[in-house]
Image (cartoon, grey):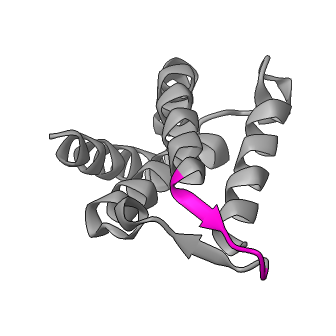
């Protein structure tokens, strides 16, 4: 289902981002501009749901809800993070000049904080 689609998308983005010719990089940047908004929305929604699945206890350490411990959940998280990272790192000539660039970087910071506790 959804995991398979994200895995394929990750492999395609990874392959396209590895191109070294300037024309291929410009092509990937065009892909990045088109894909960032829809993929960013899926990534943000999934990150929010993952945050809801992660629970804290009184000692301040992070505890996992049963659904959050599911291997498919973490695999989906990893591949979504990878897709989003590829787009943010190589999908733009200048990310800071995109309309939502700073907001996207703040979301990434929040996700890292969530995962590291």
**Left or right side of 33 for 6:** left
Residue 34 vertical placement versus 59 (above, below)? above
Residue 95 vertical placement versus 15 (above, below)? above
The span shown in magenta is: 53-59
Residue at (54, 29) in percent of width and height? 32
Q: Is residue 18 magenta?
A: no
Residue at (44, 56) in percent of width and height? 77
Task: Residue 61: give x, y in percent of width and height.
Answer: 71, 80
Residue at (78, 54) in percent of width and height? 109
Residue 84 vertical placement versus 115 (above, below)? above
Residue 41, picture quadrant: top right
Give the camera-side residue of 78 and 59.
59
Residue at (29, 69) in percent of width and height? 71
Task: Residue 12: give x, y in percent of width and height.
Answer: 30, 44
Give the camera-side residue of 82 and 11.
82
Q: Residue furthest front?
A: 58
Q: Is residue 26 visible?
A: no
Task: Residue 82: give x, y in percent of width and height.
Answer: 48, 55
Count numbered badges in the picture. Answer: 0
**Left or right side of 115 for 107:** right
């Amino acid at each position: 289902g959804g995991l398979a689609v994200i895995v394929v998308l990750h492999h395609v983005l990874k392959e396209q981002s590895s191109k070294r010719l300037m024309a291929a990089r410009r092509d990937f940047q065009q892909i990045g501009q088109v894909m960032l908004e829809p993929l960013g929305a899926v990534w943000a929604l999934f990150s929010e749901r993952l945050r809801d699945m992660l629970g804290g206890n009184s000692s301040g350490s992070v505890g996992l809800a049963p659904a959050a411990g599911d291997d498919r959940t973490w695999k989906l998280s990893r591949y979504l993070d990878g897709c989003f990272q590829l787009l943010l790192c190589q999908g733009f000539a200048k990310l800071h000049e995109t309309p939502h660039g700073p907001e996207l970087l703040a979301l990434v910071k929040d996700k890292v904080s969530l995962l590291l506790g």
